[in-house]
Every structure is written in C-alpha cells, then in structure tokens.
Image (tube, rainbow, N blue to C red):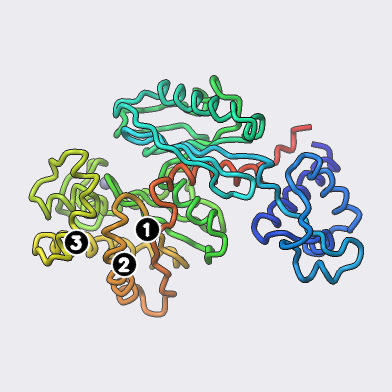
Amino acid sequence: MADQTLARYVNELSILTLLRTQGPASRAELARKLSLTPATITRLVSELGRRRLVHELRDAGTSALSRREPGRPGVSVALNPAGAYFLGVEIGVGIVRISLLDLSASVVSSSAHSVPPTLTPQEAVALVAGELKKLERNARFKGRIHSMGVTVPGLVQLDGFIVYLPILGWKNVNLTELLSRRIDLPCVVENNANAAAFGSVYLQPSLPSVCTIFLKLGTGCGGAAIVNGRLLRGAAGTAGEVGHIRLTDHGHRCSCGQTGCLETWVNLAALARIWRGTDRLTDAEFATLPNDVVKAATAGEPAALAAIGSLTHHLNLGIVSLVNFLNPTTIMLGGVMRPLLEFCLEDIRAEVASRIVPGTLVPDVRMSMLGDFECALGAASLAHHCAFDLSKVDLADS
Ligand SMILES: [Zn+2]
C-alpha cells in the first residue's frame, strides 16, 4: 500500500472508530482529537460520506462544543448505521444462531435455527450461505454486508482452523476455507466463549474494560480474557480454557481426560448430579435445570441449596485464582447457567472479595447483558472490530 493511501486508510479508520466509541462530533473536534488539519478532515469526511459510512446531523446530535465553533456551526458528523452490516453466526449443538450488527454496532436482527445435533461442517456452511442469501434479497442489506464471524464450541487456532470440537464430532476442520468456497465475504472463525467475551466488552464501551474475564457456564465452562480491547489468545490462539483449571485431584472425569477440573464442578451435569443424584437428564430437563434449581432453592429444598452451594464454592475458587493472576477490572458471567448465577451473584461478589489477595482490586462481578445470542453477537462484534482494526492493514495491498 502506498504511503499516502495507507495514511488515508488509517485516518479514515480513526475517524470511524472515534465516532463509534465517542458519538457524533464536529469536523473541528475530529481535527483536534486526531491531530489532523481541518482541510484533511473535511476531505476525509466527504469521502466517507460519499461511501455512505458517515452522515451529517444538524439538530439533536450536535454537541455543545460544535455549536460554538466557527465554520459549520450546528453540524456534527455521525456514523451512518446503515452504511455497513456485520453477520455473526453461532454454530451450537442442535442450534445455529445468527445476528446482524450495523455500522454503529447496534443489533439489527437475531434468529435461531434448529439443526440436527450431528450437523456436519458442510451442512453448517450451506445453512449460513442460505441465510446470507435471504438477507441479501432485502434491498436494505444488499451489497452492504461487509464481513462475518462464526463461532464453534471447540478449540480454534489463530488462523480459524478448528483443531478439536468433540461435542459435534469435528476434528481438524478448516472452516474458513469451507466458508470461502460458498461465501464471498471476509470471515473470522472463533471459539464461542472467546467471541461471547469479546462481544460483551465491545458492545458495552461505557464499561471499564482494561481487563475483563468472561466465564460462560453451561454444558461446559468456557472462558476468555479481554485485555485492552483484545482477546488474550496465547501462542496458537487456544488460551482461555479456564474450565480445565484443576481444583481437586478427585472428582468427575472431565472431557479433557483429567479429574477435578473447574468445569466438572460448575457445569449443568455437576448441578444435576447433586440436585437430582444423576446427570442423565433429557435435553429439555437440562434446558430448564438452572431455573428449576433456583425455584427449589427458593422453596428451601436442601438438595437444591446443596447443589448451588457446591457450584458457587468451586466457581469462587476458580474466579479467585483468575483474579489473583490477572487483576481484572470486571468478571462477566454468561451462558445458560445465567438464572442461577444471577440468583447467587451477591454471594459470589462477597466471597471473591474476601478470598483474593488482600490489597488486590476487587473486580466488578456482573452478568453479561447479551443473553442467548451472546456468541452470535460476539462473532458479529469480531467481524465489526476487524473492519476497524488498524493492525489488520495489509501493507502489501495496493
Ligand atoms: Zn478438563
């Protein structure tokens, strides 16, 4: 990429990022915050406007600062939400969820599709390609879907290669390659907990986010850390397997082959074993398990209280270790265990605060706000982020 072209590209992304994270601004404010000349800003903004990525606001969105400024008083520049869209796909067990974000990273639509639990990579790609085609029939989205993110509940390398996805029986699958054969969009493939973690931070820019640890509790226990807006990926990209922190030598055999992993103490099966005496529940029973246990505990049932006590005790041990290691600002809790975690949130907060190394910042322990679509929204957030990410600039691209 030629120097001038690169400089323009970087400046355009800087303007778009500033408008997304800080809201509408006058041209003078943009020039000041980005240390660019007013003439450069005027030229860049008009080019972004020509591509429908920004538009002008004249009344309500105008900042007090811009009203006092000479030149074009009362005119702010804002992102045009309809300028581009970003697709997010969660490939789960028996379900595929799809979400769409606009250029301002607001949710446009979300849908869930039942699929066989034995879904193959080829079937997943065909479904995604079909749904994308349906969206593009709508004039609003035609030619405006910029890129997509896809998540799977398994080990994914930095290049999107799926190393291990035992729950769907996938091993060594190059999903990026399969998607590129059917879909002509840039695509990022990511582990589902990583994506949910990223989305929970990215879509709530007002939260403190120097370091956020996300824990996703359900069939398993996934996790991820977001440090300064980026996923902590490790050498090959598989970091964040917090569910396999070994808490004890004894305990149930984990999917990784070990015993005593955090996951085996805090997942749905662990809850069922203590409350019902078995983890051989139907899918429907597992789906309502967290709510059912909360109801029983509220009624004072001893087995339900014991199940919640065991889960929170082991979860707190895991969180305390993570807090001591990473000194996070926020612990975010998500996954299908949400109702139960919400029920004991105050206890978790108190226990974590009392057990971490004295003097360590007590993190804000809170629930993720993204709900059932946290992975699909996280996947779309990753695609959105890539479009704005200066580190992805290809210097060889002319
Ligand atoms: Zn394990």
* Amino acid of disc 2: Leu
Q: Say whether marks 1 and 2 touch (CB < 8 Å).
A: yes
Q: Nearer the viewer, residue 83 or 308?
A: 83
Task: Write the residue at 39% across / 61% down.
Answer: 367
User: How packed is label 2: few (under 14 Cα within 10 Å), some, or many (20 or more)?
Assistant: some
Task: Write the residue at 43% across / 44% down.
Answer: 375
Seen in the picture, residue 159 relative to 303 is either above or below; the reply is above
Q: Which mark is residue 80?
A: none
Which tag, 2 or 3, sits closer to the chain's start?
Answer: 3
Q: Which mark is residue 345?
A: 2
**Which residue bears the numbered disc 3?**
308
Seen in the picture, residue 365 relative to 204 is either above or below; the reply is below
Horizontal relation, residue 148 to residue 76: left or right: left
Task: Write the residue at 79% across / 70% down.
Answer: 65
Alpha carbons under labels 1 and 2: distance apart: 9 Å
**Which residue bears the numbered disc 1?**
333
Q: Nearer the viewer, residue 213 or 137?
A: 137
Quadrant the N terminus occupies: top right
Q: Is residue 34 visible?
A: no
Task: Write the residue at 79% across / 32% down.
Answer: 398
Which tag, 1 or 3, sits closer to the chain's start?
Answer: 3
Alpha carbons under labels 2 and 3: distance apart: 12 Å
Which tag, 1 or 2, sits closer to the chain's start?
Answer: 1
Horizontal relation, residue 335 to residue 144: left or right: left
* Amino acid of disc 3: Ile
Quarter of the image for residue 392 reads top right
